[in-house]
Amino acid sequence: MKRYIKIILLIIMSVFVFLGCSKDNKDKADKDNNVKLYPVLEEKSGLYGYVDINGDYKIEPKFYDAETFSGDYAKVYINKDRSENIINSKGNYILPEDKEFINITMEDDFIITSTKEFKYSIYNENGEKILEDEYDSFFVDENGLIVVLKDTEKAIFNDKGKVVVPFKSNESRLHIQNKYIIWNEDNTSIVANLKGKEILRIDDNKGIRVITDNTIVNEDSNGKYNLYTIKGEKITEDEYDYIGFESDGLIGVVKDGKSGFINEKGEEEIPCIYESALPFSDGYTVVSNGGKYGIIDKDNNAVIDIKYDGIIDKTETLDNEKGSIYKYVIDERVAVIENDRTYLVNLEGKRATSSYDNIQFYNDYIIGTVTRITESGFAGVGNMIIDKDDNILSKNLAVMGIVPYDLMIVNEKEGNEGYIINSKGEILNNNLYGVVSFGYSEGYDSFVTTKGDGWAVISKDGHEIISFDDKVESVKIYDEGLYYLNYKDGKVDLVNREGKSILD
């Protein structure tokens, strides 16, 4: 009996050892698959390959040009005609090698290709063709649906290449909005779900728009706009000359030439008493009457009296980078225009700053622009960085360039170089720099700028990491602390932040 127990214990221990080894091997394999690779020109062959962080070739030089990896894939150019293909981290082609693609783009999990005849096809990330080389253009929707154009007709396919909505003429205005597919047929608007199943049909109209997940706007043949539920239940009764889009919980409407706002139930929140009204943002909107502008809140209270010649907004990109919103109140201040001059007022309507030719908002900067006389005697433009209480943080600046991470290159004299400052106007180092290079890459904590006749890499804190002399033609950031150099004599190098080559 004891002998059998020992055998069972040995088997159990063996299983655990095996599983442990398997996990270790899997972790090692995953680690190997996550090795970063960088495109490098081999001077001897004149071809591009990919090296790892140690400078060792993992994909041998065989490409006429090569781009950096994005996830698991990279675009390469496979002949002198610059035909394109996609490779994986093993260097294997994803797309057919016998095809001559002149343009390849990757959108989400799709690879969109174009032939010399400018016909488009689409593949998945495994290189399996979804749609043939016969379409004039593609658009991949955020829901993963593919809108194609062929001659003068549009159709919609899913990610497997199956038809969701068959081809319809351009006059049908087939498109995807929010989570719905919309098109017109003989003065009838049709709404379908993302699988192409019809869920609503409205007759005798010029077109519909989906403005929320539950409501749509319809323009009838008489030019009147109405709000409907997505089930087709009519909410408003032919009273509006226009219904806009939902913003900040309210929907802009126009009645008898005047603007106001309703909610999703069609209830009036702000009466139609204004000559114009912009979409709400953070609880505020800009309205006008008699050619003058002010700001109201959602209770129709005048936050800034309607007496100014204009209001300057701040544009902010949405997190998903699919659009922008406008901010009218920034840090409890509003930029107003009066008699061709601009200044800030607080939410009590009291003046907070001096007057400027113009005021701009950029990230954390408030930039006041004034006319100035340059050293050569010509009238120029100077900029002052101010705070919301009109404290001048930096003045008489010519803005050389606005760079990543809320930094700016400015100078106080004429010239092509300036200091790097932050939004407080503080000079971050004593070197002079020029314009920001295209070597800046999204996602890295540094960027490239000119320095004299050479180059410098700057951290997001505004400090110089490394610089290169005028023998270098261009600098590109491949990774944090890894820089690809193209020399004017045709040579290349890949160096770390200490300036040491990893290709030696």
Image: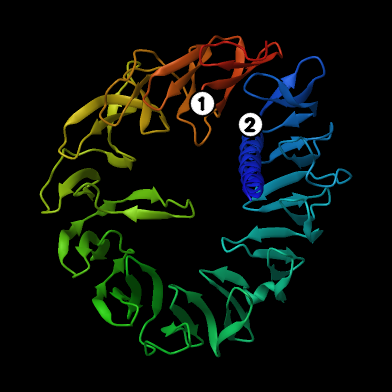
Please state which of residues 292 and 403 is positioned toward the viewer in this rendering: 403
Mark 2 → mark 1, Cα distance in angstroms: 15 Å
Q: In this view, does 68 lie above or below 495?
A: below
Identity of the residue drawn at 51% across and 69% down: 178
Within 10 angstroms of label 2, few (less than 14), some, or many (20 or more) residues?
A: few
Q: Indicate which disc, 2 or 1, sits on the residue closer to the N terminus.
A: 2
Q: In which quarter of the image is residue 201?
A: bottom right
Give the labeled residue for mark 2: 35
Q: In this view, does 30 lie above or below 241?
A: above
Identity of the residue drawn at 16% across and 36% down: 390
Q: Position of residue 421 (x, y in %)?
A: 32, 24
In this view, the residue farthest toward the front is 1
Q: Give SS at disc 1.
A: loop
User: Is residue 118 visible to the viewer in this orientation of the structure?
Assistant: yes
Q: Give SS at disc 2.
A: loop
Q: In this view, does 328 lie above or below 73?
A: below
Give the labeled residue for mark 1: 480
Q: Quadrant of residue 22?
A: top right
